[in-house]
Image: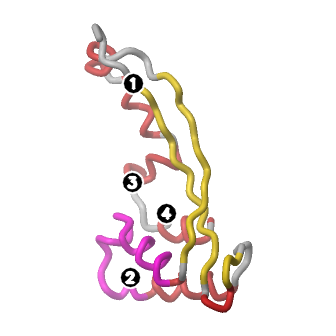
Amino acid sequence: MSQIRDLVDAHATPEQMTSRTGLWKKFFTIPIYSQLFEPPTDIEAWPYTLPATLEIVTERALSKSPLAVQNDEVKKKAEETVKEIVEKGDGLKWIDQEKGVFEYPYKTQVVVIKQKGN
C-alpha cells in the first residue's frame, strides 16, 4: 500500500510529512520540553494489519490532511488512483478476494515520556 502513501505524500507539505521524515522527533529538542519532561524512553514501532476494502482505503486516503484540503477535482483524481492501485492488486494480501477484503498494513509508533519531578 506504499503507492497510496506516496499518493497522499505527493500533496503534502514538509510539515505534513512528520511521521515519514521523523520531523516529529524535533518536539523532544525544544527547550520547554527539556524543562518539563525527561528524555523520551521506550520508542517502539508496532506493525500490524487491519482488514480493509476499497471503500475503507479510499476514505482513509481522502481524510488525510494533504488530500482533505484539496479541491474536488484533485480528490476525484486521487479516488480514481486509489481504485486503480487496489484493482491492480500489487502486493495485496487478500483476506477474502471475493468480498474485496485485504490486509492493510499500519505501523504505530509509541513513545513514553515522563514529566520531571514525578
Please give the residue where the numbered disc 2 appears in the rendered image. 75
Write the residue at 66% across / 91% down.
Answer: 98
Q: Distance between the residues labelled 3 and 4?
A: 8 Å
Q: Is residue 109 above or below residue 98?
A: above
**Label 4: element kind:** helix
Q: Give the range drawn in magenta.
A: 55-76
Q: In this view, does 48 lie above or below 55?
A: above
Q: Where is residue 9 in the image (x, y as percent from the top left)?
A: 49, 63
Task: Work out whether mark 1 precedes mark 3 in sequence or the reverse, and give the earlier one.
Answer: 3
Q: Which amino acid does label 2 sit on?
A: Lys
In the rendered structure, find residue 113 and report the number of the disc placed on it.
1
In the rendered structure, find residue 16 and report the number of the disc placed on it.
3
Do the numbered discs 1 and 3 sit on residues whose CB atoms are within 8 Å?
A: no
Which of the two residues, 4 or 100, is positioned nearer the viewer here?
Answer: 100
Q: What residue type is labelled 3?
A: Gln
Q: Would you say 78 lies left or right of 15 here? A: right
Please give the residue where the numbered disc 4 appears in the rendered image. 9
